[in-house]
């Protein structure tokens, strides 16, 4: 048998593959976290990530010569698969698009920037779907807060200003922004969308944002919980009840996140 070794053209293909797959690797790491600060693992990042990867594959399709049929076919198949899964999100605007819409650094500006040409008609479809969810499940929270809390003069002034500018309800006021053009809040390195919503003057939208933005982008954290439970239920602990297992896993998760502290010298 002759010596096995890679030729220069083989190394060139491997380098091309590494460079082509690097965005997928980076985004996998980005989304596998627990979104402790409202990002790096939050559901609102799913749609922008798919947009980013789809654009990456479209650029590869344009750059990869058809004279390299194996490489071109690989890119084309990956692009088709990404298009398929991206199209599936159109059936779930109430979660994927809504989550991005409810990130104040995105709002409608994201969709106006990305959903253009043949996708432009989907902007209104998405907005109508999200508005319906808000009206059915969350609009009543605004009325409850108005009954329970008297707005300060400043808060009432801001509320009237937004309504006058947008000419709409709380949903419209939020998605259109303070300038009435859908401009997003400025993104900074330490911006936390959940913290932003905790002080936002949109009571019904706030509850919707909390419910939506708390969803993980991937199942990584759930899988880690299953793995942790598997280590908990040893042969010596095989008679633990469900409520005990649930309590122990919750305590472990809270302790790992720094939400609770262990008390020393407790008898």
Image (cartoon, rainbow, N blue to C red):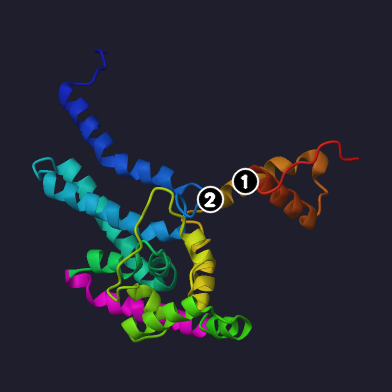
Residue drawn where x is 58% and y is 82% of the image:
150
- Give the quadrant of residue 20: top left
Residue 129 in view in this figure: no
- Magenta stretch containing residue 124, yes or no? yes
* Relative to 169, 81 lies left or right: left
Residue drawn where x is 27% and y is 51% of the image:
78
Residue 43 in view in this figure: yes
Local SS, label 2 = loop
* Relative to 88, 34 lies left or right: right
Instruction: Give, as a single range, the part of the protein colored magenta.
Output: 117-137
* Relative to 24, 11 lies left or right: left
Q: How many marks?
A: 2
Quadrant of the snapshot with the C terminus: top right
Q: Most prominent secondary structure in the magenta stretch?
A: helix
Q: Nearer the viewer, residue 155 or 6?
A: 155
Q: Nearer the viewer, residue 186 or 63?
A: 186
Disc 2 packing (10 Å; few <14; some 14–19; many ≥20): few
- Give the quadrant of residue 107: bottom left
Q: Which mark is drawn over residue 36? A: 2
Instruction: Answer above or below: position of 15 versus 111.
Output: above
Tag 2 and tag 1, C-beta contact below 8 Å: yes
* Relative to 134, 145 lies left or right: right
Q: Which mark is drawn over residue 158? A: none
Q: Earlier in the sequence, mark 2 or mark 1?
A: 2
Q: Which mark is drawn over residue 257? A: 1
């Amino acid at each position: 048998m002759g010596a096995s070794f890679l030729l220069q053209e083989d190394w060139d293909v491997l380098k091309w593959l590494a460079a082509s797959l690097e965005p997928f690797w980076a985004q996998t790491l980005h989304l596998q976290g627990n979104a402790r600060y409202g990002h790096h693992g939050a559901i609102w990042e799913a749609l922008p990530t798919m947009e980013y990867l789809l654009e990456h594959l479209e650029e590869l399709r344009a750059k990869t010569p058809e004279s390299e049929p194996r490489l071109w076919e690989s890119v084309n198949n990956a692009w088709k698969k990404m298009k398929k899964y991206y199209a599936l999100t159109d059936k779930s605007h109430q979660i994927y698009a809504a989550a991005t819409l409810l990130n104040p650094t995105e709002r409608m500006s994201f969709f106006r920037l990305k959903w253009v040409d043949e996708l432009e008609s989907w902007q209104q479809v998405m907005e109508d779907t999200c508005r319906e969810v808000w009206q059915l499940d969350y609009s009543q929270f605004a009325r409850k807060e108005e009954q329970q809390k008297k707005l300060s003069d400043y808060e009432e002034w801001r509320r009237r200003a937004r309504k006058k500018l947008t000419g709409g309800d709380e949903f419209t006021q939020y998605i259109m922004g303070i300038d009435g053009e859908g401009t997003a809040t400025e993104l900074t390195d330490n911006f936390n969308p959940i913290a932003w919503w905790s002080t936002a003057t949109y009571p019904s939208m706030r509850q919707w944002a909390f419910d939506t933005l708390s969803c993980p982008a991937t199942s990584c954290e759930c899988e880690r919980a299953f793995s942790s439970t598997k280590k908990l239920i040893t042969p010596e602990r095989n008679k633990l009840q469900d409520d005990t297992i649930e309590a122990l896993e919750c305590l472990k998760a809270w302790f790992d996140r720094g939400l609770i502290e262990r008390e020393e010298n407790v008898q």
